[in-house]
Structure formats: structure tokens, C-alpha cells
Image (cartoon, grey):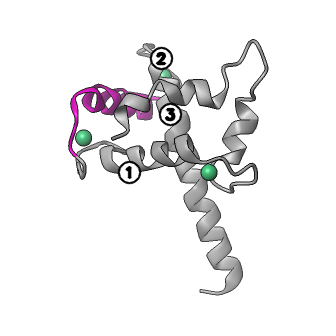
């Protein structure tokens, strides 16, 4: 792998992490059976239900594309990360800016998941 390929692989991985976080935030409020994000929406709905009762540190359960352990790891990162330039979660902070009254900030969204993160 050359440097550019490695950079791209990393960027893909980070984009994947952001997708997982976005889906979890989406699913907290979504109960639309015709949701445009189906079938992934349903996978993450199942995951969220499971995580309310899951207290296993290394849980390897998956619901379609949604994995319990990995998604928790991503949430943990976003909850504890404060790097303004973080290549993983900074773009999410642009989507959910602080101080916009109509849009809850990323932090507020993530607070909903705090209890899922062991
Ligand atoms: Zn949905
Ligand atoms: Zn689990
Ligand atoms: Zn970060």
C-alpha cells in the first residue's frame, strides 16, 4: 500500500465511523417503518434496543450492519474527544453545531447514549 492508498483507507474508515454515529443518532428519534434509511435504520434500531440491556464489555452481537462492540467504541471516542481538528469526529460537529437553537449539538445527541457506553 502506498501513502495515498493508506490515507484513503483511513478516510474510508473514519467515514464509516461517522456513518455509524449518525445512524445511532437518527434512530433515537426514528420510528418510521418506511424510513429512507431502511434497512440500516432497522439494524440500528435493533442495536439500540439491545444496548439498553447489554452490559457486556466485549459483546460481539451484530444486527445486520450494526455491531454492538464497535459502535460503543465509536461513541466512546466521540464522547471523550475534544480535538477540534479530529479527522474522525470533527465533521460531525459541523453537522450538529453548538449554539444553533434549532439543531441539538453533537454533545446533546451523544448524551442520549452515555448510558450505553460502558
Ligand atoms: Zn429511520
Ligand atoms: Zn451487546
Ligand atoms: Zn475525535
Q: Which residue: 22% across, 35% down?
A: 54
Cα distance, mark 3 to mark 2?
A: 10 Å
The residue carrying mark 2 is 30
The answer to whether the beta carbon of the residue marked 1 is less than 8 Å from any atom of ligand 2 is no
Instruction: Say if mark 1 contacts mark 3, CB within 8 Å.
Output: no
Q: In what quadrant of the picture does the N terminus appear? A: bottom right
For disc 2, the neighbor class at 10 Å (few under 14, some 14 to 19, many from 20) is some
Magenta segment, which residues? 37-56
- Tell me where residue 117 sits by quadrant: top left
Looking at the image, is mark 1 or mark 2 earlier in the sequence? 2
Question: Quick check: 23 above or below 74?
Answer: above
In the image, taking residue 101 as reference, residue 26 lies left or right, namely: left
In the image, taking residue 22 as reference, residue 67 lies left or right, namely: left
Of helix, strand and loop, which one carries label 3?
helix
Q: Is residue 42 magenta?
A: yes
The residue carrying mark 1 is 70
Q: Hey, which residue is sitting farthest right in the picture?
A: 100
Task: Residue 66: give x, y in percent of width and height.
Answer: 36, 42
Residue 8: which numbered mark, if any? none
Q: Is residue 53 magenta?
A: yes
The residue carrying mark 3 is 23
Q: Nearer the viewer, residue 36 or 72?
A: 72
- Tell me where residue 13 sits by quadrant: bottom right
The answer to whether the beta carbon of the residue marked 3 is less than 8 Å from any atom of ligand 1 is no
For disc 1, the neighbor class at 10 Å (few under 14, some 14 to 19, many from 20) is some
Q: Nearer the viewer, residue 99 or 41?
A: 99
Q: Which residue: 56% across, 25% down?
A: 109
Amino acid at each position: 500500500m502506498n501513502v495515498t492508498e493508506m490515507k484513503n483507507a483511513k478516510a474510508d474508515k473514519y467515514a464509516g465511523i461517522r456513518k455509524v454515529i449518525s445512524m445511532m443518532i437518527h434512530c433515537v428519534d426514528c420510528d418510521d417503518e418506511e424510513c429512507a434509511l431502511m434497512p440500516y435504520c432497522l439494524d440500528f434500531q435493533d442495536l439500540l434496543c439491545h444496548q439498553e440491556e447489554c452490559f457486556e464489555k466485549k459483546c460481539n452481537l451484530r444486527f445486520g450492519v450494526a455491531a454492538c462492540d464497535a459502535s460503543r467504541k465509536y461513541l466512546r471516542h466521540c464522547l471523550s474527544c475534544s480535538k477540534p481538528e479530529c479527522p474522525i469526529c470533527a465533521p460531525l460537529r459541523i453537522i450538529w453545531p453548538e449554539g444553533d437553537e434549532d439543531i441539538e449539538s453533537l454533545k446533546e445527541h451523544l448524551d442520549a447514549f452515555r448510558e450505553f457506553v460502558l
